[in-house]
Amino acid sequence: MLALRLARGAHPLVLLRRLLVAAAAAGTGFLVLAALGHAAAHPATTGASLARLLWCAVPLAATAQLAVSVARTDPAARLQRGMNAAGLGPVRLTLLAAASTALSCALGALLSLIAFFALRGDLGGAAEAAGSRRVEPGLLGAGHPVPLLGALLLLSLVPLTAAAATAIALRPRTEPGVVEPPAPAARTAPTGLPWGVALTAAGLAIESYTSPAPGAHGGLPPLPGRLIGSPPGVLAGWALAAFGLALAGPGLVYLSGQLLCTGRPGALRLLSGRVLQEEARRLGRPLGVLCAVASAAYAAVTVYEAAPARPPGPFTAVGTAVVLACVTVSALTATAESRAARARTTAALRRLGATASVLHRATALRTLALLLVLGPLTWTVAEMATLPLVQ
């Protein structure tokens, strides 16, 4: 009930972020239901249906990441003062954030369920009014009964996964009586960069080693809708390389700030570099995931351009749109969270005489440094991932 009241009284921007989470959950839920419809229409091809369902793990993970990013910026998650007196400590606030996330995702899942049955023609009068606007029957298994309980159980994975991810990400990390480390300790370099680079290199090596010869049967790794014949080693290599990029994200952001501070930096470079070093852990993971998704999207487009006779299916477009939208909004949300965390520092700089143009130039310099470090790396990983498949 408290989660509902906080949702009703939230700022319009907060409501917009929650609606984006609901939209992502709706897209992911629709893909899950589409896999269920395919299983109902093709009971003999259990492997293909299971593969479609497994591919839904990618948009599900992206939806969970978006939900966590939105929950971090939710004002309800930071209401420490006053809430303790009302009996809502850090643990209960975490549970409140998880409940709010589950509520948003449940709304999106419900919308996807209605859309799924409407497009299948299972809603009676609404389906008759839709008429010719139904999709191709084979796509959603129209005409074949789909168990409602099974659909609800599969859809429950979306809010449960997002709520669990939110609870884990926002759980209290300090116990009463434990002194937190001082602020300069936040500028210590993240430790994930070497591991991320190693995992990315290992993933590219696995993908190169297991790639079939060009022109061989199953030589191209089809996306959802064209899953038969996908080389498992190629897909595993891509996944490992993407995970390595995401793991290396905080270290890459810290490295960008360190590069700005090299030599004898002026005030502008020093300010920009220190901000990147301070915010490396907050910005690094969403930016690393964004780079991984951009690299995978570039690689997929390159691969499919090499095989125009095997275009991706319609649900590939839906899944790609969900993933790209989630990771982009997550990165933007992390940027907004970083800006809010620096509000006091920015106000202090303004009181010391820093003009708005100086702060804007510092922001532009940070953005340029991130582009110069992350952009070439993303392009290089994408090119190396596609090289064994299109040569």
Image (spheres, rainbow, N blue to C red):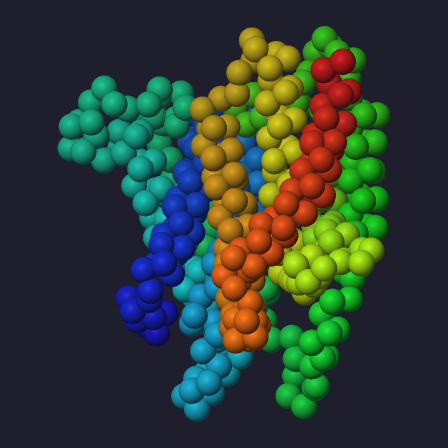
Residue 328 seen in the figure: yes
Q: Does 101 appear above or below 351?
A: above
Residue at 31% x, 37% y: name it: 115
Q: Between 291 and 124, which is closer to the camera in this rendering?
A: 291
Occupied quadrant, residue 50: top right
Residue 39 screen position, x and y as percent? 48, 30
Q: Depth check: 16 or 318 in front?
A: 16
Residue at 43 percent of width and 45 percent of height: 24
Where residue 46 appears, as percent x and y from the top left, is 56, 28
So how many labels did they put on this image? 0
Q: Which of the two residues, 268 or 115, is positioned nearer the viewer here?
A: 268
The residue closer to the viewer here, 204 or 27, is 204
Q: Residue at x 26, y 29 (%)?
A: 121
Q: Is residue 109 visible?
A: no
Q: Is residue 148 left or right of residue 223?
A: left
Give the residue drawn at x 50%, y 28%: 316
Q: Position of residue 324 (x, y in %)?
A: 52, 39
Which x, y percent locates residue 161?
52, 55
- Asked whether, in this view, residue 223 is left or right of residue 71, the answer is right
Question: Looking at the figure, which quarter contains the N terminus?
Answer: bottom left
Quadrant the C terminus occupies: top right
Q: Is residue 75 above or below residue 224?
A: below
